[in-house]
Image (spheres, rainbow, N blue to C red):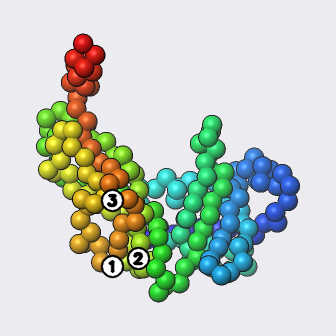
Amino acid sequence: METIALGVEPRVIRKKEAAKLRKNGIVPAVIYHKGEETVAVSVNEIALNKLVHSAESHIIDLQFPDGKTLRSFIKDVQFDPVSDRIIHTDFQLFAADEVVEMEVPVAISGDSIGVEKGGKILILRHALTIQGLPANMPDHVTIDVTNLDMGHIIHVREIPMDAYTGLSIMDEPETPVISIAPPKKDAEAETESAAG
């Protein structure tokens, strides 16, 4: 997993301060670690967007103006329900030997037989919650869809984790992750016949 540097500025929590920051393209954030005091910071919205909307997960070195660096990962992101802009972020610190849970993006490999028949691949879960040591965390979890046929679904319990040493998926086993939807015309025909 790649490590990315991200500049942060300490901030003082005041009334209406968060709204003022957002207006200037700055996102309020907090940094926390179990047993330690939470630190309020702010981060550039454009730089944060690149990380949040990346197809890969990252370790993030939070760099303060005084030269201090804290190693972290993004634990939570809040979006504005209307504009979809990031309005707040939580960064979690960790020790190298500490088991953590991270959101890791899903990637697909292979040519699905369902797609070859005209179906459309649907990623129902774009990231999985993975537990393990930070050093073992992958950029993404790759799921082979070669044998996925029309109307079939891959659930969390069906994702092989042999290639990911010491890691576990923490999502519910029955959670659907990827499916193949039938072509639109077929789906419409099924709906009409069910209605008739």
Tell me if residue 40 comes above or below residue 48 in the rendering. below
Q: Nearer the viewer, mark 3 or mark 2?
A: 3
Dot 1 or dot 2, earlier in sequence: 2
Tell me if 11 is positioned left or right of 139 in this view: right
Q: Nearer the viewer, mark 1 or mark 3?
A: 3
Amino acid type at image mark 2: Gly
First in sequence: mark 1 or mark 3?
A: 1
Q: How many residues crowd mark 2 within 10 Å: few (<14), some (14–19), many (20+)? A: some
Q: Which residue is mark 3?
A: 173
Closer-to-camera residue (23/179): 179
**Residue on which the image places disc 1:** 166
From the top left corner, tell me how far across and down residue 25 is, in percent: 70, 50
- Dividing the picture into quadrants, the one containing residue 32 is bottom right
Q: Is residue 164 above or below residue 75?
A: below
Mark 3 or 2 closer to N-term?
2
Residue 112 vs residue 63, the one in the foreground: 112
**Badge 1 element:** loop
Q: Quadrant of the C terminus?
A: top left
Callout 1 crowding tier (Cα within 10 Å): few <14, some 14–19, many ≥20: few
